[in-house]
Amino acid sequence: MLTERELLATWACEPWDRPPPPPDDIDAESLRRKGNAHFAKGEHAAAEEAYTAALDVLLLVPDDAARGVVLANRSAARLKLGTARARAALNDADEAARLAPG
């Protein structure tokens, strides 16, 4: 799974160097729900991974409102992972508020 930074870096590459798009049966909403299920079970690292995968998909099909929701979810998962992830959680929360205020 690519991080947001890695995915953005691939866009600067030649088309044949880019990773293939996600399969049609993988959508951001199903990945977000998968993250929610992991979060509910206390599997916060798995939730973070699922939310990151959803964000990867949303980079290909921009939807600011959906991206804001997923960033807020990932922020919560990162907070549950402890102080080592606190800065990343805050960055996600700030971006979520910018994308989906209110």
Image: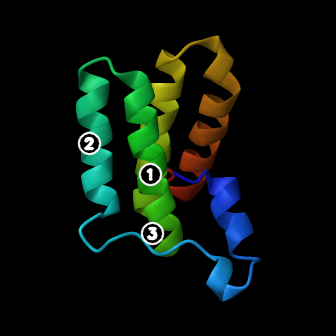
Residue at the outermost bottom position: 15
Q: Secondary structure under badge 1?
A: helix
On screen, residue 12 above or below 36: below
User: As shown in the figure, which amino acid type bears the numbered disc 1?
Assistant: Ala
Q: Is residue 99 left or right of residue 9?
A: left
Q: CA distance from mark 1 to mark 3?
A: 15 Å
Q: How is the image coloured?
A: rainbow
Q: Which residue is mark 3?
A: 63
Res. 9 mark? none
Counting residues from the start of the chain, the first of labels 3 and 2 encountered is 2
- Near mark 2 (Cα within 10 A), the count class, few <14, some 14-19 or many ≥20, is some
Residue at 65% from the left image edge and 86% from the top image edge:
15
**CB atoms at circles 2 and 1 under 8 Å apart?**
no
Residue at 28% from the left image edge and 36% from the top image edge:
36
Q: CA distance from mark 3 to mark 2?
A: 19 Å
Q: Secondary structure under badge 2?
A: helix
Can residue 65 be seen in the rendering of this structure? yes
Residue 13 quadrant: bottom right
Q: Nearer the viewer, residue 89 or 34?
A: 34
Name the spot of residue 44 as percent of width and height, x first. Answer: 40, 23
Counting residues from the start of the chain, the first of labels 1 and 3 encountered is 1
Q: Secondary structure under badge 3?
A: loop
Q: Which residue is mark 1?
A: 53
Name the spot of residue 85 as percent of width and height, x first. Answer: 63, 23
Counting residues from the start of the chain, the first of labels 2 and 1 encountered is 2
Q: Which residue is mark 2?
A: 34
User: As shown in the figure, which amino acid type bears the numbered disc 2?
Assistant: Lys
